Amino acid sequence: MPESGDISLRRLGPSPVSQDLGAAPARSAPQRARADAVGQGLLDRVSHRVARTFSAVPIFRGRRPATARRGASPAVDGAAIDLLDLEVVAKDFAVQISDWRIERGARVALIGHNGAGKTTIMDALLGLRKPVRLRGSMLGRDFAAWHRRPALRRRLGVLLTRASYAIDGVAHIVDFHRRLYGGDSGAAAEALGISPLRGQHYPLLSRGERQRLDLFMALAHRPDIAFLDEPFTGLDQQYTLAAGDLIRGLRDTTVVMACHSAAELSLASVAAWLDRGRILLCDSPQAMREKLIGEFRLHVSFATPAAAERFRRRAATELKPRFTHVISAVELSLFGSEALVTLARGLVDDAEVTAVELARATFGDLLYRCSLGDMDA
């Protein structure tokens, strides 16, 4: 999987395969055979190193032991993540979260503006960033145990914004995953279109192709908890839909994801709105949309800035919309209740109005509102 804190998955230097690619972009069959042999040899050495790192749990071949199989009862029942206290220094503020519980099987979307602390929280829970304080547990095990014991981390899936591998060939990377986890979900490979990529090399993949492979590495072994940083970034519509169906199908997997798109948010059962390292609101996306922006969006364009300003002031006094988005001097959108439907009908014949559009508020609208932070602070 993408970087998860294990040294075996970090690039420690240029690989023999990538050097060969740089020297000869178009190679003969014997050259390709030699490159594949080099890659396979490196794969064997990396697998051996990982086997020693995971000495508490050997590399599985075939059926997993009962303690590692999906559906096996964990030693301790309870929340997937029970975060009692977290403090991490980030940029010009500190991420501070306490008494936050994520139930098993939940799909949690961390939303908010860039730099709100979404990735910082995931990095701290994974042990990739050193916190000032971290108390709590994942799957009944203290966070410190997860950070000390590589064998525990086999139960996780991780998608970071940047990934690197000690081997470049896609086929070797996929084989490495299978050796590490003792097989994978064929559904994941099919959904993400991995087979056509097997003959290619990771550094030469497009942004979307890398994202598909990284998602495969994070999800193919059906982890108990998956941490996904903007999982749909770079994917076209075909693979956005396929990846969404794949994540929904992991019913026993708890998913924590940083998200900036409506497609990602639509997967979530819980949304946590962050601003400057603090959770302002935690609820279902549907309930959060109702609380922050309401059910409807009314977009109005005016002939003059003066007319738009008069309308904005009147609406603020009489309607008290949940949220007003001033797009330009002559355009604005109001968000609120069904009262906007009545208002829209009255604007149709207004000579100062050039356009009226009424629609239901979307998750995209909610993400925009949350990207503005706490406007009451």
Image (cartoon, rainbow, N blue to C red):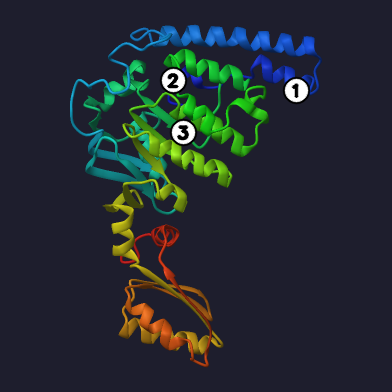
Q: Is residue 130 visible?
A: no
Locate residue 315 relative to residue 31 in the image: left or right: left
Q: Is residue 141 visible?
A: yes
Mark 1 near mark 2, Cβ–Cβ under 8 Å? no
Q: Nearer the viewer, residue 27 or 137?
A: 27
Report the amino acid beneath label 2.
Answer: Asp
Mark 1–mark 3 Cα distance, whole angstroms, equals 27 Å
The numbered mark, 1 or 2, whose residue comes first in the sequence reads 2
Choose between 23 and 359: the one closer to the eye: 359
Label 1 crowd (10 A; few <14 / some 14-19 / many >=20): few
Which label number is shown at residue 94? none
For mark 3, what is the residue? Answer: 159
* Residue ID for mark 1: 22
As drawn, is 264 to the left or to the right of 328?
left
Q: Is residue 334 above or below residue 79?
A: below
Amino acid at dot 3:
Leu
Residue at position x 43%, y 30% in the image: 158
Q: Amino acid at mark 1?
A: Gly
Q: Is residue 19 above or below residue 349?
A: above
Q: Position of residue 12 (x, y in %)?
A: 56, 19
Tag 3 secondary structure = strand
Residue 37's x, y, as percent? 67, 8
Left or right: residue 356 versus residue 279 is right
User: Measured from the top left, where is residue 352 in percent x and y?
Assistant: 52, 91
Find disc 2 in the rendering and name its residue: 6
Q: Please name which of the two marks, 1 or 3, marks the residue nearer to the observer.
A: 3
Q: Secondary structure at mark 2?
A: loop
Q: Position of residue 281 (x, y in %)?
A: 28, 54
Q: Quadrant of the C terminus?
A: bottom left
- Closer to us: 10 or 249: 249
